[in-house]
Image (spheres, rainbow, N blue to C red):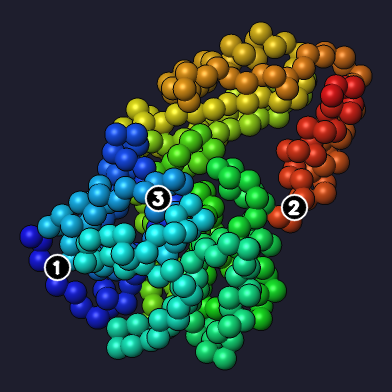
Amino acid sequence: MQILIHNRAENLKIAVTADIHLTSRTKHPERFRTLERLFRDVIEAGISQLIIAGDCFDKNQSNYHEWDALCGKSEFNRLNLTMIPGNHDALITSAHFASSNVNVYTEPVLMPSDTLMSLPILFVPYLQDRTMGEILAGFKTQLKPRQWILIGHGDWSDGLKTGNPYEPGIYMPLSRYDLDLYQPRSVILGHIHKPTDSDRVAYPGSPCPLDILETGRRRYLVLDTENGEVTSSDIHSEALFFNETFIVFPGQDEFKRLKTEMTRRIDSWRLQPHEKDICRIRIQIKGITSDKNTLAALVQDVFQPFRFYRDETPDLSELFVNDDSNLEKLAQLAIREADVLNFNPGPYDPDRESVILQALKTVYGET
């Protein structure tokens, strides 16, 4: 057994993950392997508490033997695991698990501060047909502004541009009004699978990507319960997904512009040499081109070092051909005007690329 010696500073820190969606090792072994690596990373960081903010298990999962076996391993049984149910595993309770280091909170509970935790934590599991604000109202007299932490499972309804593509809909929403009224120091939620940091709320994201829509590096969050600070730690995942869309329009430097942008996107992935082997990509090109054949060859050449997700090919279904020089000038003018607007879209506003694409379709008469 690995013996861990914790000092007070280490005990003040809690690791948080969510949305693992375990099924079985036979069906999705990569999710279990990722979880094992996460456990080891947390222990090596000197942290003895891990919170799973909902959807540890996928829907219709009822056999928890493999989870119990993992938690009971000698190298992990000193790691205290706190679970709150999500919308996929809303019916789990502590009674489902034999492991003594697993605790499940099926109802909202405010964990008070103590000698090892300066800020109280309110755990809010997913409750069907309820809002986060309704739950917070029940604790109003106990929540001192900026002196408590919220960990729950649901949608930050006012702060995200995209929801959870794994399942459309709104689940137990938390609003900006709720945050302004109750003023938590920090908020960490499960449910959105993409690692996301807004001005008020953090989502750790799923530690193992479920599909191509869950792009970028995976992580877990570390919460300092003394000051409410939330930091991020990378998880070494078995897969890295990148889903990129490029908008093009004709011009003298059309293909040079596209190649420059594709290269910039690849650089933004910050891949280490060994990570190319686990990288899977999806590429979509939209807009207008003067030569679809030349463009397709360029895309294949630039992304030649990478494997496409499920052996797909670049998606050119929304790419149209038109080399009318007069329309080209109008398109360039429309793009310049869009850039002048200095886009800073809200959570439900179209982004710059969407506006430019619609302008190009209007100019060139494509639908």
Q: Label 3's element?
A: loop
> Residue 156 location, x and y as percent?
61, 62
Where residue 13 sits, quadrant-wise, is: bottom left
Which kind of residue does numbered mark 2 sit on?
Tyr
* Residue at the spot of label 1: 4
Cα distance between the residues tagged 3 and 2: 30 Å
* Residue at the spot of label 2: 348
> Residue 252 location, x and y as percent?
75, 18
State which quarter of the image contains the N terminus.
Answer: bottom left
View extreme (bottom): residue: 141
Determine crowd level at label 1: few under 14, some 14-19, many 20+ residues with C-alpha closer than 10 A: few
Front of the two marks 1 and 3: 3
Residue 161 is left or right of residue 149, and the answer is right
* Residue at the spot of label 3: 57
Cα distance between the residues tagged 2 and 1: 47 Å
State which quarter of the image contains the C terminus.
Answer: top right
User: Is residue 107 visible in the rendered structure shown here?
Assistant: yes
Determine crowd level at label 3: few under 14, some 14-19, many 20+ residues with C-alpha closer than 10 A: many
View extreme (left): residue: 1
Residue 342 is left or right of residue 194, and the answer is right
Q: Residue at x 55, y 17 (%)?
A: 313
